[in-house]
Amino acid sequence: MPLRFTRCPENPIVVPGLYDWRRATVFNPGVLYDDGRFYLYERAAGQLRPFHCYIGMLESDDGVHFTHVSDQPVFTPEMAGSKVRQRVTRAWSRSTACTI
């Protein structure tokens, strides 16, 4: 018998916001079920430029209503060895130059 999936009527289950590191977008969720609890891992970004991804972890008793286990991501670019750089863009006009 083929496996059938039904979209949750409370979709979407997770949305961006709440913390700076996940303010712009959340995507690629994956869920583990262990000992009666659901654990959702999400990929998130606080802004689109520069785009740095973080992994957040949420938990749930019913698989629909999730809460974060921490206000901090469980995995960051720095933990993977990345050096996060500040990007500087210069906007020029005839009379002034400014850093954005």
Image (spheres, rainbow, N blue to C red):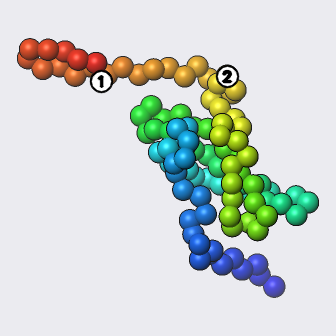
33 or 19, nearer to the observer: 19
Relative side of 97 to 49, left or right: left
Contact? badges 1 and 2 (CB < 8 Å): no
Say whether disc 1 or disc 2 marks the residue closer to the N-terminus.
2
Q: Which mark is residue 81?
A: 2
Q: How crowded is mark 1: few (under 14 residues within 10 Å), some or many (20 or more)?
A: few
**Image spot of residue 28 (x, y percent):** 62, 53
Is 91 situated above or below 30? Answer: above
Q: Is mark 2 on a helix, strand or loop?
A: loop
Q: Residue at x 65, y 40 (%)?
A: 71
The quarter of the picture where residue 32 lies is bottom right
Q: Residue at x 79, y 64 (%)?
A: 61
**Image spot of residue 31 (x, y percent):** 74, 57
Q: In the rendered image, which residue does mark 1 sit on?
A: 100
Q: Which residue lies furthest to the right in this view?
A: 35
| Residue 45 visible, this orientation | no
Say what amino acid the circle numbered 2 marks: Gly
Say what amino acid the circle numbered 1 marks: Ile
Gap between marks 1 and 2 measured at Cα: 27 Å
The quarter of the picture where residue 19 lies is top right
Quarter of the picture holding the C terminus: top left
